[in-house]
Image (tube, helix red, strand yellow):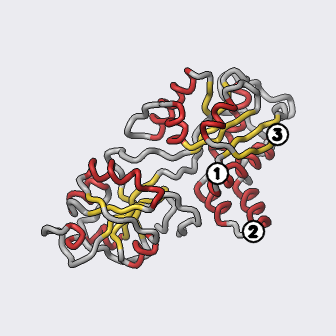
Amino acid sequence: MRTWGPVVAVVLVAASLGTAGCAGTDPAAACPPVAGAATTTLADDRGVLSAKVWLPVISSKAGSPDWLEPLDVASRSLTDAGLDGILEARDVDARAVAVQAAVSDIPRAAARAVAGRRPGATPPGPSGTADARSYHLLVPASPLGDAVGAYYAAALERQGHAVSTTAAGTAEAVTTVSRDRAGDVALVELPDLAGTLGALLPSTGTAGQVRAAATVAAERSLALGAPSAANRTPQVVVTRAFAAAHGNLTDLTGLARACPGLPLTATDGAVGALAPLAAAYGLGRADADRDAVGSLRSGRVAAALAPVLHHAG
């Protein structure tokens, strides 16, 4: 059973009041919410919502295969559970324990496997240890950015590298990295990076969006590391009872078919998702709800948009 993390940046809810049934002139009254702790995700089957994964960015002129490989190891090991543990830590000591737990599955430098190495990367020495390097991580000045930065720093240190960290906005971080100094790494979310680079991303699939961003980055002599396994791609969740009551809903097209025009509302961080979702699925728009998670569970609203796997299942 997963619990909602303390930092949920985006939440979108489908507000509903009134009587049961999905016919009538008032969509909110026709498809009321159904309270319950157990939830299920409704797939964004038209690919409207942008992927939110973390990407390390370095200069492609600074020995990218060797510098990116340890970052790739870190990215593949950053799970939702590990990131949630860091975010949920109540004090400095608990945070340190959570960070170490998050990197505990990463082999230490002396035991690293050579399988899966990036093309062109220098093989490790006879002991299996790669040359120690000094990384300078530039991370967003936010609770989530701070948690991600702490994780990557610990993951690199576990692999035998020295690390320093500085808070920086996405544009500033990318500009710093473009100066071609080996070791500078911008840790940014995919949507922010794409916006900074002016990349036009495909509407579906994280892998395709990463490839599109990488193509634009390469034109600016930047190289992207592997995307984090953990992500904050928003997905709509409803209670399982609500999904069952409306034909065992599995995706947003099904929601729109069962409850056409159902009004969607968002917290401040998710307002930008309202218009594209409403337009793509024929749903409506309503006022914001700051307590979307509590409202979903108590039956005050019908659905909530939150980071994937960041809700009770």
Q: Which of the two residues, 131 or 222, is positioned nearer the viewer here? A: 222
User: Mark 3 or mark 1, which is nearer to you?
Assistant: 1
Q: Are marks 3 and 1 in contact (CB under 8 Å)?
A: no
Callout 2: SS: loop
Residue tagged 1: 145
User: Which of the 4 image quarters holds residue 250?
Assistant: bottom left
Marking on residue 161: 3
- How many angstroms separate mark 2 from mark 1 (CA)? 17 Å
Q: Amino acid at mark 2?
A: Asp
Q: Residue 233 — which label?
A: none
For label 3, the crowd category at 10 Å Cα-Cα, with few meaning under 14, some 14 to 19 and many 20 or more, is: some
With respect to residue 222, does 26 lie above or below?
below
Q: Is 168 located above or below residue 59 in the figure?
A: below
Residue 94 visible in the shown view: yes
Q: Report which quarter residue 162 is drawn in.
A: top right
Residue at 47 percent of width and 40 percent of height: 206
Residue that mark 2 sits on? 91
Vertical placement of residue 113 versus 281, above or below: above
Which amino acid type is shown beneath numbered disc 1?
Answer: Gly
Residue at (32% x, 76% y) in the render = 34
Q: Specify whether 279 is left or right of 237.
A: left
Residue at position x 28%, y 63% in the image: 263
CA distance for labels 3 and 2: 26 Å
Furthest residue to the right? Answer: 127
* Residue plotted at (21% across, 67% down): 27
Mark 3: which amino acid?
His
Relative to 219, is 294 on the left or the right? Answer: left
Viewer-closest of 142 and 35: 142
Residue 38: image x %, image y %? 43, 72
**Precedes in sequence: disc 2 or disc 1:** 2
Furthest toward the left, the residue is: 24
